[in-house]
Image: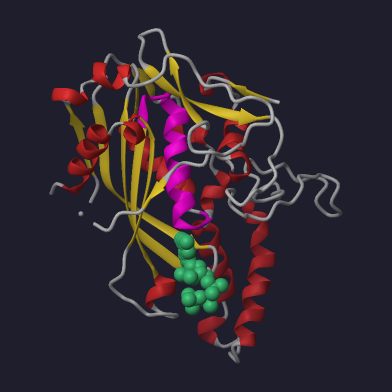
Amino acid sequence: MSFTRQLSEMSASELNDAIDDTNFPQAHILSRGRNNSVCSTSSTSGTSSLADRALSQPEEPVVPQPGSAVGTPTDELVPSGGATNRPRLILKTNGSIPENDGTQPTTPMTPRTSTTPGHEKCTFHHDLELDHKPPTREALLPDMARSYRLLLGGLGENPDRQGLIKTPERAAKAMLYFTKGYDQCLEDVLNGAVFDEDHDEMVVVKDIEMFSMCEHHLVPFYGKVSIGYLPCNKILGLSKLARIVEIFSRRLQVQERLTKQIAVAVTQAVQPAGVAVVVEGVHMCMVMRGVQKINSKTVTSTMLGVFRDDHKTREEFLNLVNSK
Ligand SMILES: Nc1nc2c(ncn2[C@@H]2O[C@H](COP(=O)(O)OP(=O)(O)OP(=O)(O)O)[C@@H](O)[C@H]2O)c(=O)[nH]1
Ligand SMILES: [Zn+2]
């Protein structure tokens, strides 16, 4: 049965479940062909004023009917009339995991279980991308180091030569670092830095450096992320936007999912009227191997709420992002 809930009412684990791919809102991804982190706030004027934005939104949340399609762009993040008549984005969650109808990401699903032999004491990972995790991620190091040692042998190298003797352990630690986002959750990262503030103009933090790992080739992709949101009387500590980028970039990723996860996390954090995220990435799997296109860049965007519905708001954001 479908239902809507205010994100602020969700527990931390529910928030993380909601952000997971399995019931992830399908944000509309726009790719646009189009430099260190800059924060701007913007006073909107003319027809893209707050009042106009608010008026352009329906007053009541759209509650999908049972059996209606899950994951269509119009019914996942829905505006909700708040005390200020300001439409907030709320996240629709679904009690069950929907069938993959082709609109869902295809991250393999493994059931959460604590009965898997050898993992009885594992605490559940907060993210369904992993079915479990050991008590600490550092506990993975010996197994990972052994795997890297095998890999070195597979390459024809002598893992016991001086230069390589500590490489398996170093590589394992590096991989743990590259994927440390699996150990982070939104609530911890926010650390309560959500402030009541009578500010309803656009906030943009742009050019946030991002380093991630391509889930197809296990090689890095990197670039920059720009995030904008229109607050509804709640603002987020500025550094938390960059920390949200870290949570999701420090995992095995595809750029599209990364973009969407960041947008949804900001929505969860402050229930704004809208969120916009643009990611520009360079994929080393397209540079050092494969097609070897060293100058190509991939641009992905997620526009939610008023950024999606009101082209002037979207343009204002893109102008701020593209300005020097
Ligand atoms: N959509 C998307 N694709 C990605 C991303 N990172 C890597 N890829 C692509 O994943 C695809 C994997 O394709 P495959 O044909 O299975 O693998 P491959 O033989 O290594 O492909 P080539 O890279 O074309 O040599 C490639 O097209 C990559 O460019 C990403 O973030 N998003
Ligand atoms: Zn790749």
* Furthest residue toward bottom: 156
Q: Which region of the structure is painted magenta?
A: 251-274
For residue 111, above or below residue 294: above
> Residue 185, position in %: x, y?
54, 38
Q: Can residue 101 be seen in this view?
A: yes
Based on the picture, tell me whether residue 56 belongs to the magenta stretch. no
Observer-nearest residue: 86 or 153? 86
Q: Residue at x 66, y 45 (%)?
A: 128
Query: Quadrant location of residue 59?
Result: top left
Q: For this rendering, which residue is in front, 75 or 83? A: 75
Residue appearing at x 42%, y 33% in the figure:
266
Which quadrant of the figure contains the N terminus? top right
Residue 81's quadrant in the figure? top left
Magenta span main SS:
helix
Drawn side of residue 251 relative to residue 102, left or right: left
Is residue 255 part of the magenta span, yes or no? yes
Count the labels in the image: 0
